Image: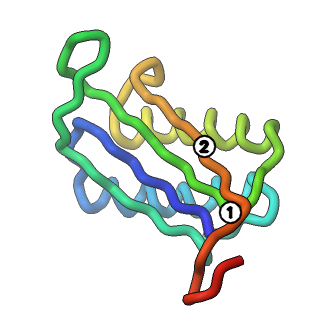
Amino acid sequence: MPYISITTSKKLTETVREEIAKELGVLITTIPGKEEKHLMIHFADEQDMFFRGQRGDYAFITVQLYTAAPYDAKSEFAGAVCEMLEDKAGIAIPDIYLNFTEFPNWCAGGALK
């Protein structure tokens, strides 16, 4: 189950949230074994964010994955997510950061995998 959390200083309308969620559902399939039907997304918009000592329009995206994914797939996914977020939310790519955390174990449905 991939989990994606997007924290941004920008206000995201419900329409933009839905567009981003739909696009993430497509993009997650670039990572082998990951599908939209298992994807959970969290939005935290209108957050106070400072970067380089200044308040501005920024985004930090955390992607949590059950099991490790190939570097090339993560690279393709990360680039596409940044481009999509620039297009949908109006945040410049140099102000978007994304990281991956991969876990060997994950509890889903009450069972540890």
Q: Which three-letter amino acid code belongs to the residue tagged 1? A: Tyr
Question: Residue 84, image x and y in percent?
Answer: 50, 41
Q: Earlier in the sequence, mark 1 or mark 2?
A: 1
Position of residue 71 in the picture relative to residue 17 (left or right): right
Report whether 52 appears left or right of 80: left
Looking at the image, residue 108 lies above or below residue 99: below
Please identify the quadrant where the N terminus is shown: bottom right
In the picture, measured across the screen, residue 73 lies left or right of residue 58, that is: right
Q: Give the quarter of the image for residue 96.
A: top left
Indicate which disc residue 17 carries.
none
Identify which residue is drawn at 68% across, 67% down: 105
Q: Position of residue 87 (x, y in %)?
A: 43, 36
The Cα–Cα distance between marks 1 and 2, rounded to whole angstroms, is 11 Å
- In depth, the one of 5 and 14 nearer the eye is 5
Near mark 1 (Cα within 10 A), the count class, few <14, some 14-19 or many ≥20, is some
Name the residue rendered at 60%, 47% in the picture: 101
Q: Residue at x 53, y 34 (%)?
A: 83
Viewer-proximal residue among 15 and 92: 92
Q: Is residue 54 above or below residue 111?
A: above
**Residue on which the image places disc 1:** 66
Type of amino acid under label 2: Phe
Q: Which residue is mark 2?
A: 100
Q: Residue at x 56, y 88 (%)?
A: 110
- Which part of the image, by quadrant, shows the C terminus? bottom right
In the picture as drawn, the residue positioned furthest to the bottom comes out as 110
